[in-house]
Amino acid sequence: MSAEGTLTLLILDDESRILSALRRSLRREPYEILTAESVVEARRVLDAEAVDLVLSDHKMPGITGLQFLEEVAERHPEAVRMLITGWTETIDPKAVDALGIRAVITKPWEDAALKETLRRAAKEVG
Amino acid sequence: MRRSHREDDALGLRVVVVQPPDHGPRIAEGLEVLAGRATLEIVHDARRCLSRCDAGDVDLLVLDARRRAEVQSVLAATARSGGPPAIVIEPEAGDARALAWFRAGAVDCVSAEEAPKRLGTAVAEQLARDRARRTARGGDLGFAGNREVMEQLNSALVVVDLEGRIVYANPPAEQILGAEGSLHGADAGKRFRSGKSEEPLLLRTLRGGERFKGAEALVSRPDGSKAPVGISCAPITSPEGRRTGAVAIFQDLSEATQRRSHALQTEKLASIGQLAAGVAHEINNPMGFIHANLFQLAEYTEDLQRVWRQVEALRHAAEGADPTAVRIAAEALDKASQEADIEFVLGDLAKAIRESQEGSERIRHIVQDLRDFSHQDTGERVFADLNQCLDSTANIVWPMMKHVVSLEKDYAELPPIGCYPMQLKQVFMNLLVNAFQAIEEAVGESGELGTIALSTRIEDEQVVVSIRDSGVGIAQEHLERIFDPFFTTKRVGAGTGLGLSTSFGIVQGHGGTLSVESVPGQGTTFQLRLPLDAEAPAAS
């Protein structure tokens, strides 16, 4: 959590245009938004900042969102984890449950639904 | 490997079982019914099995196919040297597997699950068949005493004399050959026609003594219909070593052939599915941000309209002379601007539009690639640019592989080649998808990129298209089989094992060749060669 008490949200997607569009969608929401275009970058952010919410793309070079969130679950278990993907069919719901992933958002996303999902996830941040 | 048969009857028949020394299918249990009639030996590997066969007193092999490569090497070795017949115990269910084993030279295939129940019968049947064959080698074609045994066989069996006339056909043979009345004396040459060469296999056996195992042929019936058969032929020789005739055992493959064409269709659908998934993903990303951006642009427009209304109000106030009204209007404008975060909106507006335009440009490109790929293809033979065929196929499969592959292209200028472009694109797609999967397996989750290098050149009046990958490579024992139908090393469901055999057939149909070189751990290169003056035959 940042000093002002707003929640910090880290978004990881290898597609910069998606990051930029998500930022736009969430510009009036009360989060401090950090973005990363690669897993390496995302790890750096997680090590340097106190991140409350993590939203990760699924299909990325070299690693899947599920694998990355598994890593987050081990190293930063307090962060609420969410997945955003265009590939709902290839995601094993059992893996989603096992990793304690709170929400799977599909691309293209609906603005209102995205905000609502994040608000609900934010309530879980203790 | 020589087989010298002892004179003893059923007792003392020797069955060698090759099974890894762990808990496998219950082979011994399946063979219990043979107790007292046959001796059972269990060896653990191919080497020991083959040296055992060399001794010459083995009547039958039972091979546990969990170690595929080993079983294949045993079958290949016994086929070469006329060793004992082999029954394969297949761990996975499915006709495709069984069919593949028949083609590899097995005389029967029993699933591991059924082994305890069915193996005994299968072995008894093979031993009876083997005895029949042996006795048939005796004087006067010598089959008379074994008529009873041969009548009982499930497989079709015919015996022909030196003139190629049928002297015996068992009931299944009569059924397949469509006998009306007796087949006795019928010309075998008219009934058996090899699928590949003019001279029927059975006649080649008669003339040259050649043996065939698990070959394919066509039989013609009196009513004009034809049936594909899997056939094994062997010469019959008198004790003095004089050839007296030939025997053929065959099975109707019509059903198997239908299954194969069904599997081919499945293969095609699978690659289309994979392709569609790749394209869908590639379109979905730009679609995702364009969709979100348009939503925001609509909000920005409302924000701007609100601010603009305050600007209008301020201008009205400025036209009057009331300074208070002007101040109030100016304050309202400030407030509206702040609420709308107008600085940000003005800055981001152009950016959101630019990014969306870029996204729609990307989608336009993908559609263009799809159009190039299927460009006015009527499925007929035309003169086409192979570079374009290769390139448009690579563009189509690119989205699904770009996360793990870097693509290199080195195209020479090529003259138009007479070909069926859609068929060649299917070959390119098969090869590219295989290359991608080999790289995916090699790089795993390391995040590294593998390389696929595409090149075209002209060499010795041939167009050479080469597709090289830096993937896992192909093991030596698999290399010689990768063009076989149904042969696959991919996990169940990932491939039908028909991609490469189909590709091979297509290239052959174009009068060309498809070859492969591979170093495990380093990569694989497929090379497709087409004659420059390719005269493609009519589409099949």
Image (cartoon, rainbow, N blue to C red):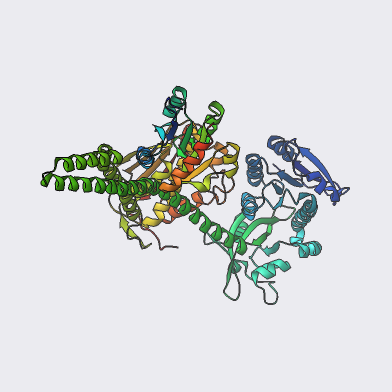
User: As drawn, is A113 to the left or to the right of B71?
Assistant: left
Work out whether residue B208 or residue B479 is closer to the camera in this orientation and state it.
Answer: B479
Q: Is residue B457 left or right of residue B515?
A: left
Can residue B14 be seen here? The reply is: yes
Q: Position of residue B203 (x, y in %)?
A: 60, 61
- Coordinates of residue B299 in the picture (x, y in percent): 32, 47
Q: In the depicted view, which residue is nearer to us: B178 or B423?
A: B423
B182 is higher (above) or lower (below) than A40: below
Q: Is residue B360 above or below residue A73?
A: below
Q: How many badges with numbers are in the image? A: 0
Q: Quadrant of the C terminus of chain B?
A: bottom left
Residue B119 against residue B1 in the figure, above or below? below
Q: Is residue B471 left or right of residue B136?
A: left
Q: Position of residue B3 (x, y in %)?
A: 73, 45
Looking at the picture, how far across and down is residue B516, in whole percent?
Answer: 46, 41
Q: Is residue B201 left or right of residue B181?
A: left
Determine whether B53 is above or below B111 in the image.
above
Task: Locate residue B372: give its quadrant.
Answer: bottom left
